[in-house]
Amino acid sequence: MDPKEMKERMKIPKQPMPEQNPKERVRNFYEVPYGYTSEQAMQEAKRCIMCKNPLCVGGCPVNIDIPWFIQLIAEGKFVEAARKIKETNGLPAVCGRVCPQEDQCEKICVVGKKGQPVSIGRLERFAADYEREHGEVAIPDIPKWTGKKVALVGAGPAGLTVAGDLVKKGHKVTVFEALHAPGGVEAVHHRHDQVCQHQSQIRAGADDLLGFDPRSGPLHGMALLSQQLRQRGGHLSIIIHDENHRRSA
């Protein structure tokens, strides 16, 4: 980046997140932050100086190409930005809301060394919400079946992410969930202002379109042993992922 342009970008102030009026939010359990507008997102994205050695990527647990997706937002290519994020993160709308960016990617943002870091999480949320709200969510091409079947016990964020990744590799996936609906804790316990529970449900619907088989109810929870699943369903691998049991059988 040209030094002059970099200097100008460093002068752009951090864009505040629009929020509900306190007098209104005490009367509901909806999300407090509204999210960026397109104009605010583009302005915030222009604060990124496109470092040659982007430390933020190393601070991201799933190594999202942060400078690339932020540059796409700066150029007004919002859908492309969402798809760039989804190359390594299947839950951008959720992560953009609850991931502790202040202790990860934003904590080591170079811009933050001389001022406030780029709002990476807010931009991730914006891109994911924009893609969904404008009906641009696309289902990737699914390769030919590999002949392998996998059972996943637990349809929370981790289980849904694994299911999506396995389906995209050509495996047939069955997801077993003990609760009445997929989505995990986000879908059944948290309030709207904590995580926006419909995000996980949306992800569940998107993964359903990918072709995996979701099954909910107490009989399909932890009561099913891995041996039973192999005998009844011919599954080669049983992956259990919930708050109390995390293992692969």
Image (cartoon, rainbow, N blue to C red):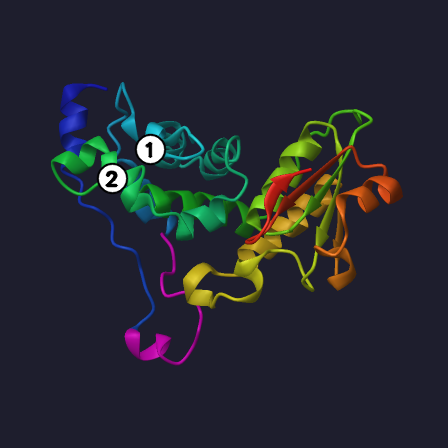
Q: Which mark is residue 197?
A: none
- CB atoms of marks 1 and 2 within 8 Å: yes
Q: Answer whether residue 137 is visible to the viewer in this image.
A: no
Q: Is residue 203 left or right of residue 118?
A: right
Q: Is residue 149 left or right of residue 164?
A: right
Residue 141 quadrant: top right
Q: Answer whether residue 144 is visible to the viewer in this image.
A: yes
Above or below 214: residue 211: above
Number of on-image labels: 2
- Which residue lies at the image location 72% right of the left edge and 44% below the top edge? 209
The image shows residue 242 at horizontal and vertical percentages of: 59, 51
Q: Which residue is mark 2?
A: 107
Q: Which residue is mark 1?
A: 59
What amino acid is at disc 1? Answer: Gly
Secondary structure mostly seen in the magenta stretch: loop
Is 25 within the magenta? yes
* Quadrant position of the C terminus in the picture: top right
* Secondary element type, mark 2: helix
